[in-house]
Amino acid sequence: MAQEHRKLLIIGSGPAGYTAAVYAARAMVEPLLIQGMQPGGQLTITTEVENWPGLVEVQGPDLMVKMEEHARAMGADIKFDTVSKLDLSVRPFRAECDSGDVVTADAVVLATGAQAKWLGLPSEEKFQGFGVSACATCDGFFYRGKEVVVIGGGNTAVEEALFLTNFASKVTLIHRRDELRAEKILQRRLLKNPKIEPLWDHEVVEVLGEQDPLGVTGVKIRNVKTGAESTLDTSGVFVAIGHSPASELVNDQLELLEGGYVKVEPGTTRTSIPGVFAAGDLTDHVYRQAVTSAGMGCMAALDAERFLAEHDEAGEPAPDAAQIEEVPA
Ligand code: NAP
């Protein structure tokens, strides 16, 4: 077990974390970034990204490899480990990692992102990994020539449905309303794809399947307007109903907003504990884009840098300029 101290610890390796690392490294803060279980975050399980400025199209995983390289090239230390416990009650803050290593830090940038939401059905849990998935790019390949359903009406659901047409013979998009939340350009692509059939005003109430071997055979669906229930045959169920913030490390230590998002002072990344900053999907319940996360990562590094400049390493604020006795010339 190793123990080290840093001025700045960044937790998370999505666009927010890596951007914070680039800025903090360039400010000579010598940050340590701990990547977490999924280095690169959510963009590593997508395909084409068409809204990263400057690149008409880039693969999500490639973009994240480039961000990591960029942060390293600027001098950030990046470690593949997961913070399992974070103590924000005293400064220096203390992070314990899965490896057993301990890092203390004068300031922390939280950029742990968000994780996929599930419907919460017992049958959904039972078939997870056996026909139920929240990642088309990871599991789509297994559904070559088969019929699948995607649940949701946002960008993720539409992108997953479009991606699955590369493998599946038919994709049914089950949405609880009759209007999609996804961007118009994605809606247009979805509606003109002959392999995709939207099923409006329906929700999935149960995943149906076989025990031996464990596998999905269909879904029980309900029309939300009439209440009528019916069954739809399918081999795969892709749940794409949004994400919730990964705030488990701090949910009993920081002020949170409804839904578990970390609360920050408007216009800043400052959380309810001085020296702790939050950026990206962990705190943003409005925009939730790669580019806005990167912007918040930049803000967090600048806020942390200012905080570090104003506080000494023992955790006491640096003496105010007005309090410093003038030495007679
Ligand atoms: P989202 O925009 O929050 O959409 C979630 C969808 O799931 C909504 O259509 C919602 O229905 C539905 N839903 C939620 N809970 C449900 C439940 N219990 N049962 C059935 N349906 C349920 O989530 P997202 O699509 O994952 O996107 C998250 C954020 O990432 C968004 O800001 C999005 O713009 C961004 N994103 C961007 C891109 C891109 O720019 N290329 C790609 C992916 C994601 P209602 O519509 O009825 O609420």
Image (tube, rainbow, N blue to C red):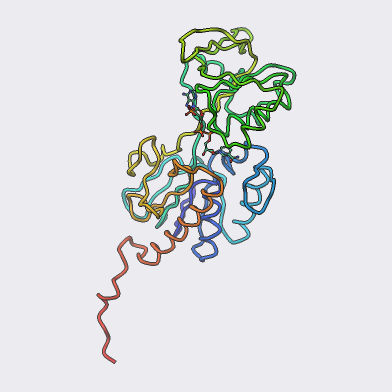
Viewer-nearest residue: 256 or 308: 256
Q: Residue at x 45, y 52 (%)?
A: 109
Q: Residue at x 40, y 44 (%)?
A: 86
Is residue 117 positioned above or below 65 on the image?
above
Question: Splitting the image into 4 quarters, where does residue 180 fall?
Answer: top right
Q: Is residue 163 left or right of residue 1?
A: right
Question: Splitting the image into 4 quarters, where does residue 77 fall?
Answer: bottom right
Locate residue 103, reporting x and y percent.
45, 51
Viewer-nearest residue: 304 or 33: 304
Viewer-nearest residue: 17 or 229: 229
Is residue 328 positioned above or below 214 on the image?
below
Give the total of numbered labels.
Answer: 0
Locate residue 14, reporting x and y percent.
55, 46
Question: Splitting the image into 4 quarters, where does residue 329 fall?
Answer: bottom left
Locate residue 142, reporting x and y percent.
70, 22
Q: Residue at x 49, y 41 (%)?
A: 113
> In the image as oriented, which residue stretches furthest toward the bottom?
329
